[in-house]
Amino acid sequence: MNQAKIKRRVGKYEMGRTIGEGTFAKVKFARNSETGDPVAIKILDKDKVLKHKMAEQIKREIATMKLIRHPHVVQLYEVLASKTKIFIVLEFVTGGELFDKIVNHGRMQEKEARKYFHQLINAVDYCHSRGVYHRDLKPENLLLHASGHLKVSDFGLSALSQQVRDDGLLHTTCGTPNYVAPEVLNDHGYDGTTADLWSCGVILFVLLAGYLPFDDSNLMNLYKKISSAEFSCPPWMSFGAMKLITRILDPNPMTRITVAEILEDEWFKKDYKPPVFNEKEDANLDDVEAVFKDSEEYHVTEKKEEQPTPMNAFELISMSKGLNLGNLFEEQQGFKRETRFTSKCSANEIISKIEEAAKPLGFDVHKKNYKMRLENVKAGRKGNLNVATEVFQVAPSLHMVEVRKAKGDTLEFHKFYKNLSTSLEDVVWKTEEEMQDR
């Protein structure tokens, strides 16, 4: 394959595919062109940050995160800025989400769940001790390193969707409702420490039970269940685990168990080994200050070009489970928020075929270069379903198409993809063996 030009470069980083997005930020895969190392880059819009008067809080939390090097926290390497954007360069974690293990294999045995819970509590306790709170712990933020241990992402960066008032408490209700503490929902102000611990309790319950402790299709009923801690543990859960979960999922933050008490709990202490690591010293914070200075000398250069992003072998492997590349293109991918297929059609042909297929399904189509945003005009269970698609060049005559849920309900996304894939049968590349099976 000939060396193709990179679609976008920010300073020394070659930008690749989008791997996540939220209200304030988008996350892209990238590679350090000097070292070849993969990174994830969180991109913020400067105007939004300034408009919501969040510059000082973000600067403070980014500076703190630069000082943190913990084995179970995704590392923040550096911060860059252009005239309009802020780029936060983060460690790229290749092992997928912890909750994919639940989706694919069901609930965990207590020994395995306890190991991950040890790592989660270690990460949370370490960051709290340095004044950094997550405030939005949920499945998407629990990643697995290639070696199998837990990495918590977005610590300290949750300020992007939070507000602190004069009383020093947080007031914005945010996060995935099923994981959010009662005091957050009640909007009386809350302490980030106790709110994070509640979310940890919900996560432990899901690891051991295989389902959520609080769940209801009606949002008001869900809030009532959370506010009164209305849940019951399954019969296979040990008494020790039930006891600990009940102490964490205490609706009163004043009497809720603390980290110090969790560390002394009999169930928790079994097989517990605190992590041994060297703390980061003398981190350079000049880049954090420079990001918010509106001066050309501090701005990184951005270069763009309009053609499908080429995908190299490293990216291809990093997207697969292990080294079996066949897993990239399977139709059965469980209840995930993204899926992919390959095609021998041209990029323009793929784009127009997706547009033709999406419009009859009730979607508005927004196109930009070789990316598309499909928005369902009809609101679903979690608002309007938004689907992002992007075409990547794998080889001169082979493209890979990523179809990703950007917003809305995951089950509705899978229903949409099933309908879409039926309409795109002549676009998807099939091997000779697959053709013979038809």
Image (spheres, grey):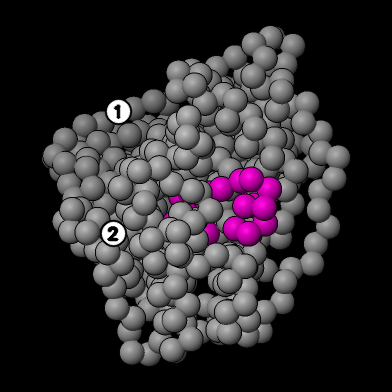
Q: Is residue 412 left or right of residue 323?
A: left
Q: Mark 2 or mark 1, which is nearer the start of the sequence?
A: 2
Residue type of the residue flagged with mark 2: Ser
Which one is in front in this view, the residue at disc 1 or the one at disc 2?
Answer: 2
Q: Is residue 430 visible?
A: no
Q: Which residue is mark 2?
A: 227
* Residue 140 falls within the magenta-colored stretch: yes
Q: Is residue 167 visible?
A: yes
Q: Residues within 10 Å of mark 1 (few under 14, many from 20)?
A: few
Relative height, residue 353 to residue 198 (above, below): above
Q: Magenta stretch?
A: 123-142
Residue 221 percent across, percent down from the top left:
18, 59
What SS does tag 2 mark? helix
- Quadrant of res 143: bottom right
Q: Residue at x 78, y 26 (%)?
A: 286
Q: Residues within 10 Å of mark 2 (few under 14, many from 20)?
A: some
Q: Is residue 20 left or right of residue 403?
A: right
Please state which of residues 256 and 101 is positioned toward the viewer in this rendering. Answer: 256
Q: Residue at x 83, y 57 (%)?
A: 278
Residue type of the residue flagged with mark 1: His
Q: Residue furthest right?
A: 282
What SS does tag 1 mark? strand
Residue 2 percent across, percent down from the top left:
65, 38
Q: Residue at x 67, y 79 (%)?
A: 272
Q: Which residue is mark 1?
A: 366
Q: Is residue 414 left or right of residue 330?
A: left
Q: Residue at x 59, y 25 (%)?
A: 56
